Amino acid sequence: MPVPPCHGSMSPLRISVGSLPVLASMTKGADPRFRLRWKAIVLSSACLGFVLLLFCLHRSSPARPVPPHPRNWRLSLQAGDRYNDTYPLSPPQRNPEGVRYRIGVIADLDTQSRGTEEHTWFSYLKKGYLVLSDSGDSVTVEWDKEESVLQSHLAEKGRGMELSELVVFNGKLYTVDD
């Protein structure tokens, strides 16, 4: 098939895509339809820079508080003190009978906790060992010979020293009046 002769000048090559001259925009340095919005660019760059600055200052702050966690609570302790999460207070002991655990019980005598003296209340604290056999089929309790008597003169509505629970906190044994 013969190629039809071209009668026009070969120097201006123009290709259009949807009425936009493609090659013309490639050859020119700048397209007059494209304008930079300098105010928006400067404003967004300044905001981004400010956010990055705040992030860097926050990350490098030496006085940043430690997040709360039971292992590092600071309750008016000295600078080097930390929360003691030891529980139980004494480690289990292995012996030929099995494993011995140190235990304690406290008595809540309710209305019977009134002492002979006026405004005196008392409770009993007893300590001992719970022994669990190696096979796990028997449990025995061995009580210490001494028994502690706890006294107080505080009462609410004619009742006092209702100590019904022992709690370990910060490596110490506590009881709280109901």
Image (cartoon, rainbow, N blue to C red):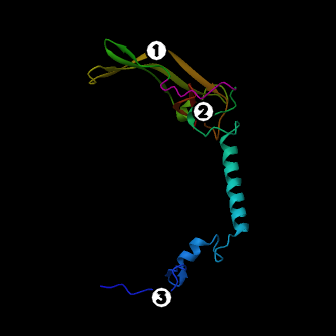
Type of amino acid at the residue the image marks with label 2: Asn
Observer able to see residue 108: no
Question: Where residue 67 sits in the image (x, y, percent)?
Answer: 61, 40
Whether residue 26 is situated above or below residue 61 in the rendered picture: below
Q: Which residues are magenta?
A: 79-88
Name the residue rendered at 72%, 62% in the picture: 42
**Cα–Cα span, label 2 and label 1:** 35 Å
Where in the figure is residue 168, as x and y percent of width and height? 53, 29
Quadrant where the C terminus is found in the figure: top right
Residue denoted by label 3: 7
Q: Quadrant of residue 77?
A: top right
Please name the residue that numbered disc 2 is placed on: 72
Per the image, label 2 sits on a secondary structure element best described as: helix
Disc 1 marks which residue? Answer: 144
| Image-based side of 84 in relation to 55, left or right | left
Q: CA distance from mark 3 to mark 1?
A: 121 Å
The amino acid on which the numbered mark 3 sits, given as a three-letter code, is His
* In this picture, residue 40 sits left or right of residue 142: right
Majority secondary structure of magenta residues: loop
53, above or below 146, in the image: below
Mark nearest the camera among 3 and 1 is: 3
Q: Percent position (x, y) of residue 103?
A: 45, 23
Q: CA distance from mark 3 to mark 2?
A: 90 Å
Nearer the camera: disc 3 or disc 2: 3
Q: Amino acid at mark 1?
A: Asp
Q: Does the residue at mark 2 contact the one at mark 1 (Cβ under 8 Å)?
A: no
